[in-house]
Image (spheres, rainbow, N blue to C red):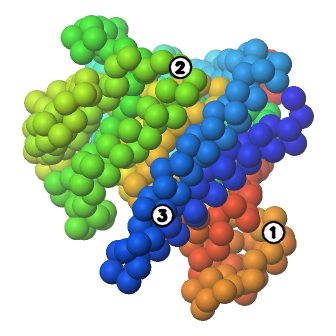
């Protein structure tokens, strides 16, 4: 398929979703007013919501059908495998140089002072910079807060042949002939490497854009795929868990982040808000196949949500382990004994067909990123209750206006075709907030009037690795 065709197909899906965000959002506002001032309108407004959502589901189903019947389904599967294989072979090449002693190295300490999701993102950032600078990554993990014996006990070492170094260690950015460069955390890195998300490598940008609706997430997902190659004991642990839980599809992964996050970095969301989106997923699915069991995989750092969902939603099969949630809550401060639970939760969340969570949590973003390496394009398989996807430390998230917009109130943006907007968030009501880089105005604009900008950046092209 042409790049244009794939883009139009994805836009159709997004257009349908955004239209319903807008219409349902407006009707809900109207309902609030009508309740007191015009109660006789309530039945009509309810009818619009109830029947309108059926129109939306039908639209989404047909757009999905399009990708099944357009004749490109096999191509997408094949291209996903080949592209991933290419990136993985490049990483293997980078990480296993012929002459380890002579090869240039990038040194990172895994133990960033934060949670597991945050630490995984730190490791991905290190590997991205290693790939960008063609330096073999040395990941130091002795004394790791999630496993004192180190990363290699649970995941395969980032290199099979080159795990140590001699020579002088320079701090980032060092210079091209520095033997070893120590890279600090992204929060204070200076100068900023050009390889940080949302960048994708120029030599693969077109292929990734054709395959995937959100190229930067796909790219990050490939780095996690490499990093998280499990050791045999980890494989066994996950196999045992899968049979204990009787993991089956369809299944929706639900991640509810509470405890220390709420009120500091994120707002509280009741379980019903998560479950509303799960319900919607199953109603949508029911149009294309018969759903006999509604199933969720539940992960949280608040064990109480297990009982609450069980009581309120007796028609659901709930997989997951409240015991893991109990250790998780404690582990945000002392992390011993929490690692297996975390590996399990992330694994099953990413294996789910759809994710409902808050993207303000790195746990859920990691699950979403891993999910991208398990499907040709899983970029729409989520519903975040708060943020849009982002990567901590990322550059500005640019969108380009493809339609103009005349503001109808002072909080709306003036938008001309071609304007670049730095997006801050989607309000999931038809509008997104951002800064127009032409006018510097920070305001709301209709989300459907912009397209993503693919940040294609010059990376080494690894010509030694066959395409
Ligand atoms: P964030 O704080 O949610 O952005 O993500 P981090 O991963 O940086 O830190 C949160 C930490 O809380 C995790 O690393 C876990 O230790 C714990 N945690 C949060 N949610 C879960 C969950 O669903 N399952 C498990 N096992 N642990 C969790």
Q: Position of residue 19 (x, y in %)?
A: 64, 58
Which one is in front, 386 or 19? 19
| Image quadrant in which the N terminus is located | top right
Would you place residue 341 above or below residue 28 in this image? above
Q: Position of residue 16 (x, y in %)?
A: 66, 50
Q: Dot 3, crowdedness within 10 Å: few (<14), some or many (≥20)?
A: some
**Residue 159 horizontal side relative to residue 69, left or right:** left
Would you place residue 293 above or below residue 420 in this image? above
Which one is in front, 269 or 360? 269
Q: Are marks 1 and 3 in contact (CB under 8 Å)?
A: no
**Residue 15 horizontal side relative to residue 434, left or right:** right
The reply to whether residue 445 is visible in this rendering is yes
Instruction: Work out whether mark 1 precedes mark 2 in sequence or the reverse, and give the earlier one.
Output: 2
Dot 2: element = loop
Residue position for label 3: 45
> Looking at this rendering, what residue extends furthest in the bottom direction?
410
Identity of the residue drawn at 48% across and 64% down: 45
What is the CA distance from the residue labelled 1 to the residue labelled 2? 36 Å
Residue 289, which numbered label?
2
Q: Position of residue 440 (x, y in %)?
A: 67, 86
Would you place residue 342 above or below residue 194 in this image? above
What is the CA distance from the residue labelled 2 to the residue labelled 3? 29 Å
Q: Are marks 1 and 2 in contact (CB under 8 Å)?
A: no
Residue 403, which numbered label?
1
Q: Are marks 2 and 3 in contact (CB under 8 Å)?
A: no
Instruction: Work out whether mark 1 precedes mark 3 in sequence or the reverse, and give the earlier one.
Output: 3
Question: Cβ(mark 3) to ligand 1 < 8 Å?
Answer: no
Q: Dot 1, crowdedness within 10 Å: few (<14), some or many (≥20)?
A: some
Would you place residue 346 above or below residue 232 in this image? below
Residue 246, which numbered label?
none
Q: Position of residue 323 (x, y in %)?
A: 10, 30
């Amino acid at each position: 398929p042409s790049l244009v065709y794939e883009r139009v197909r994805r836009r159709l899906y997004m257009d349908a979703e955004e239209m319903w965000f807008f219409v349902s959002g407006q009707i809900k506002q109207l309902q609030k007013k009508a309740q007191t001032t015009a109660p006789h309108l309530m039945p009509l407004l309810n009818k619009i919501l109830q029947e309108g959502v059926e129109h939306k589901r039908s639209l989404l189903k047909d757009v999905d059908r399009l990708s099944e019947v357009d004749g490109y389904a096999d191509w997408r599967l094949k291209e996903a495998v080949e592209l991933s294989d290419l990136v993985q072979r490049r990483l293997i090449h980078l990480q296993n140089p012929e002459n380890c002693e002579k090869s240039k190295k990038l040194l990172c300490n895994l133990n960033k002072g934060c949670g597991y999701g945050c630490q995984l993102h730190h490791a991905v950032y290190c590997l991205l910079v290693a790939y960008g600078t063609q330096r073999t990554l040395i990941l130091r993990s002795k004394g790791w807060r999630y496993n004192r014996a180190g990363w290699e006990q649970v995941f395969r070492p980032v290199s099979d042949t080159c795990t140590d170094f001699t020579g002088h260690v320079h701090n980032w950015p060092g210079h091209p002939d520095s033997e070893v460069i120590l890279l600090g955390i992204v929060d204070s890195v200076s100068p900023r490497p050009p390889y940080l998300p949302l960048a994708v490598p120029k030599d693969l940008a077109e292929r990734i854009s054709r395959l995937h609706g959100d190229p930067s997430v796909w790219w990050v997902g490939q780095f996690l795929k490499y990093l998280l190659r499990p050791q045999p004991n980890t494989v066994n642990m996950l196999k045992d868990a899968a049979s204990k839980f009787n993991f089956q599809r369809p299944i929706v992964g639900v991640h509810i982040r509470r405890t220390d996050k709420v009120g500091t970095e994120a707002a509280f969301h009741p379980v019903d808000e998560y479950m509303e989106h799960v319900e919607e997923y199953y109603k949508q699915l029911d149009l294309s196949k018969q759903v006999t069991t509604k199933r969720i995989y539940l992960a949280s750092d608040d064990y109480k949500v297990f009982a609450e969902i069980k009581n309120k939603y007796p028609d659901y099969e709930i997989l997951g382990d409240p015991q893991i949630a109990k250790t998780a809550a404690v582990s945000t401060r002392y992390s011993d004994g929490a690692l297996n639970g975390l590996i399990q939760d992330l694994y099953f969340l990413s294996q789910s067909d759809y994710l409902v969570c808050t993207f303000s949590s790195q746990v859920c973003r990691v699950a979403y990123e891993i999910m991208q390496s398990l499907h040709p394009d899983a970029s729409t398989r989520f519903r975040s209750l708060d943020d849009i996807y982002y990567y901590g430390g990322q550059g500005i998230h640019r969108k380009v206006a493809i339609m103009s917009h005349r503001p109808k109130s002072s909080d709306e943006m003036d938008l001309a075709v071609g304007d670049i907007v730095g997006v801050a968030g989607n309000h999931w009501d038809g509008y997104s907030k951002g800064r127009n880089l032409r006018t510097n105005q920070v305001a709301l604009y209709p989300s459907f009037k912009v397209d993503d900008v693919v940040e294609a950046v010059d990376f080494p092209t690894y010509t030694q690795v066959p395409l």
